[in-house]
Image (spheres, rainbow, N blue to C red):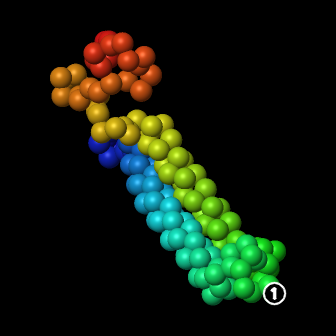
Amino acid sequence: MSEADTVTDADVSGLNQAVMARAANLARRAGTGLLVVAGIGALAWAWITLRVLDLLGDSYFGLGDDIDLGFDDRIDAVVGYLSLLLYSGLVAGAGLGLRLAADYTVTRTGGSLTGVRAGEPLSSVRRGPSPFADGGGDGEAEV
């Protein structure tokens, strides 16, 4: 059996990196999907809350014509839908966690989060002002 017919450590390492890169891509997409779902859930909570308050009438703080519905009654009506906002926050946290794990996996397997690859000329990398700059420079990073 020749060396061309056997699997080497480099082959296994390359296959592992490819599998992890695909898994990271899936996790990034799932995380983005969860963030979208969380945004829709937060919007649904806001819509339901405003609709409930609107249906209860014009007296938002119990100062109007309707004496039976005070501020505490309105709080009770809104608190029933607070779980939707709480679940949306949990889903957003899970989505951010998935995206963070995906980005970490990409960097640990030798990938690039910025799209810049090793060996590219520095002139092809667009430079902008550093987020840590004190404003006194011309925006060029020192190399």
Amino acid type for the residue under numbered disc 1: Asp
Determine whether the residue tagged by mark 1 lies in a helix, strand or loop: loop
Q: Is residue 31 above or below residue 61?
A: above
User: Residue 29, percent across and down?
Assistant: 43, 60
- Residue 52: quarter of image: bottom right
User: Residue 54, percent across and down?
Assistant: 60, 82
Q: Quadrant of the C terminus?
A: top left
User: Residue 18, percent across and down?
Assistant: 39, 49
Would residue 142 appear left or right of 57 to someone viewing this image? left
Question: Residue shown at 47%/65% (left/top)?
Answer: 36
- Seen from the viewer's position, the closer of residues 130 and 122 is 130
- Seen from the viewer's position, the closer of residues 46 and 115 is 46
Would residue 12 appear left or right of 2 to someone viewing this image? right
- Seen from the viewer's position, the closer of residues 76 and 24 is 76
Question: Residue shown at 58%/52% (left/top)?
Answer: 97
Question: Residue shown at 26%/26% (left/top)?
Answer: 127
User: Residue 111, percent across and down?
Assistant: 38, 39
Question: Residue shown at 29%/27% (left/top)?
Answer: 128
Would residue 90 appear left or right of 106 to someone viewing this image? right
Q: Can you identify the residue that label 1 sits on? A: 68
Would residue 93 appear left or right of 100 to someone viewing this image? right
Q: Is residue 39 above or below residue 57?
A: above
Q: Is residue 119 above or below residue 45?
A: above
Can residue 20 be seen from the camera position used here?
yes
Q: Is residue 106 above or below residue 130?
A: below
- Residue 50: quarter of image: bottom right
